[in-house]
Image (cartoon, grey):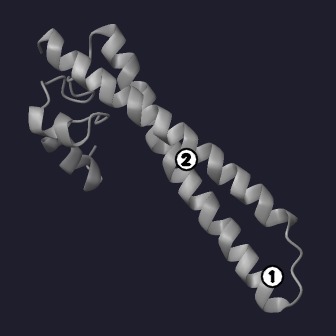
Amino acid sequence: MDKKRLEMYKKRLLDRRTELQDIVSRAEEDGRHADEEVARDLADKASSSYTKEFLFKKSNDDRFILQLVQDALERLERGEYGICVHCNGEMQQKRLDAVPWARHCIDCQEKQEQGLL
């Protein structure tokens, strides 16, 4: 992969990492505020509980993607970016354009989703 394309992916990954770090921080803060609210009745308690559960799930998903982004940046620094971590084949440009933090080529990703990897 040429240097110009690698720099473009690096910039996209760094931007996404910053965005996700902000989202995770905000979700943690919102979760703390949800704990501070005093629930008056059962409906309030249920609503507060649902809000905390939703924020936790969203934060968990964002943390997972954040880790994938960080892993992709590390692969980029090691010169392994754009190589499937399973088959060691070169990943398709369209795949990286859509999901710059992708770990697998399209074929290996399909296998993983089917539980075959």
Circles 2 and 1, Cβ within 8 Å, touching? The answer is: no
Residue 45, numbered circle: 1
* Image height of 10 relative to 15, above or below: above
Residue at 77% in and 65% down: 34
* The C terminus lies in quadrant: top left
Would residue 26 appear left or right of 77 to someone viewing this image?
A: right
Number of numbered discs: 2
* Image height of 50 relative to 40, above or below: above
Quarter occupied by residue 77: top left
Q: Could one spot residue 68 in this view of the protein? A: yes
Whichever of labels 2 and 1 marks the residue nearer the N terminus, that label is 2
- The percent position of residue 81, horizontal first and vertical second, equals 26, 20
Observer-nearest of 93 and 44:
44
Residue 9, numbered circle: none
Would residue 14 appear left or right of 81 to someone viewing this image?
A: right
* The N terminus lies in quadrant: top left
Q: Residues within 10 Å of mark 1 (few under 14, many from 20)?
A: some
Task: Give the SS element for disc 1.
Answer: helix
Residue at 74% in and 83% down: 46
Amino acid type indicated by mark 2: Ile
Residue at 25% in and 56% down: 114
- The percent position of residue 66, horizontal first and vertical second, equals 48, 37
Residue 23, numbered circle: 2
- The percent position of residue 87, horizontal first and vertical second, equals 18, 28
Would residue 106 appear left or right of 65 to someone viewing this image?
A: left
Observer-nearest of 90 and 73:
73
Q: Could one spot residue 105 in this view of the protein? A: no
Amino acid type indicated by mark 1: Lys
Would residue 94 appear left or right of 49 to someone viewing this image?
A: left
Quarter occupied by residue 7: top left
